[in-house]
Amino acid sequence: MKSSLCNIILCIFAAVFVGLMASCAAGSTSTAQSGSDAEKTTDGSTTYTTASATAPKTTVPKTTVSTTSPATSSTTSAVTTAATAAATVPETTAAPTAAPVQQTKPWKETACNEQLYVNTYCVSRARAEIGAAAVNQYYTNQKLNVVAVTDTGYYKLDNGEYIHQEYLSGGYYVTFNTTSSKYEAAPIPKQPPANTDKTCEYYNPEKALAFAAANWDSGMGHCAAFGEACIAAGGIHGLTDLGATPLYNQLLASGLGFAVEIGRDEEGYIKVPDYAFPGDIMLFYCPKEKCMVHTLVYNGCTKDGRAKAYAHNLANDGQEALWYFSFCPDGCGADIDNLALFCWYRNPEIMKQPDEPPVLNVKTKDSKAYFNWTADFLYSDSALVVKDKNGKEVYRRSMGTDKQQSLTFYSTEKYTAYIEMYIGKDITVKSAETAFSVPKAAKK
């Protein structure tokens, strides 16, 4: 009995112990469930979803139309914005990408349209920047088409390449292979070469004469420096400023023209051959010192066939017949009788029919008519022609490059006049005929 009673007591004790353990387990489960997501069911009961062992998933809240008060709506919006931002934060940070290769032009370009010459060997660049990749090689006196200039000091070519401005110029660069002393002039040929019809497209006498007209009285530099500056303005570069003698020697060695001896008439005026053309270079020769002592730029001739020339020392404006003293200005006492005329081979762009003919104007007063004419091109000689009412020539005279003349008439009948201009030996340009009559006839 006692044994049975003990067994009963042990069973009761075991049952109580098991109950206590079950109660502890239930409390532990309830605590764990309180950390889980809970949702209310439609019947008011509560269900639980066990919390995940991993990081919670972020759910972007759905956008709904707010029916709350402004204050509530503001709060809800702030929470929604924060949740949205949190949802869009990437899980990892991407590595920064490399900066793209710069394709823009960090320089400014100004459009232009020029033909320039390479003045020394150089290379073109892919961009208008120092150190840019080299593209092509170019050599002295290559003619290139320039379409723009940059503010970084480069020219842009029509093929898209860039060349630094210091390597391109507006003219041809002469190279010399002469052994003539700079103190002694090469002999002056007595006659021109058999072929004087070669061309020199590099020299523009119009530009050379325009420079001479603007600078003949500047007082800057000696006569040879003035001549070289005029030649450079005409498009020929590379002559050294060492005086009249080396200038003459270099011109001969350039191969861009020919020299011939010319002289003075009995009155001391210079006579020039028919093939002389404005922009040619004249130099005075001292036979005793065997050197050139003066440089001038020929500007055509008067109606009397006497040379006109621009001169810097002993300044001359190139509009009147040039008289030159017959003794050497160096003081050696030698007579100056011989001169050298350097004739450029002709530029075909100058020696052609002009776009516009010359214009002749006539004014009359009493028995006189006053003629003047203009032309926008160079010519070597001209003639004024007057016809009577029957078309017969009553007057024709060579006018050189003079541009005005006056005549006296002994009849009041109607006349017509025109001017002819000669460009080289084969090209004649004629103005329109101008009709006129004088108010009264002169008495013979």
Image: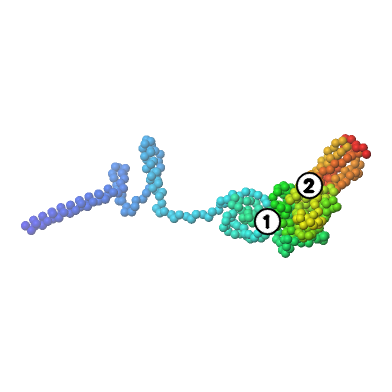
Amino acid type of the residue that numbered disc 2 sits on in the rendered structure: Gln
Q: Which residue is mark 1?
A: 117
Q: Is residue 238 left or right of residue 272?
A: left
Residues under numbered marks 1 and 2 in contact, where contact means CB atoms less than 8 Å apart: no
Considering only order in the chain, which callout, 2 or 1, is on the residue closer to the N terminus? Answer: 1
Q: Residues within 10 Å of mark 2 (few under 14, many from 20)?
A: some
Residue 424 seen in the figure: no
Q: Is residue 218 left or right of residue 265?
A: left
Q: Which residue is mark 2?
A: 319
Q: Secondary structure at mark 1?
A: strand
Residue 420 higher or lower than 255, as above or below: above
Amino acid type of the residue that numbered disc 1 sits on in the rendered structure: Tyr
Residue 265 screen position, x and y as percent: 85, 53
Identified at 20% across, 51% down, the residue is: 23
Front residue (pair 230, 76): 230
Residue 166 screen position, x and y as percent: 63, 55
Identified at 65% across, 51% down, the residue is: 147
- Quadrant where the C terminus is found in the figure: top right
Front residue (pair 361, 278): 278
Identified at 73% across, 62% down, the residue is: 181
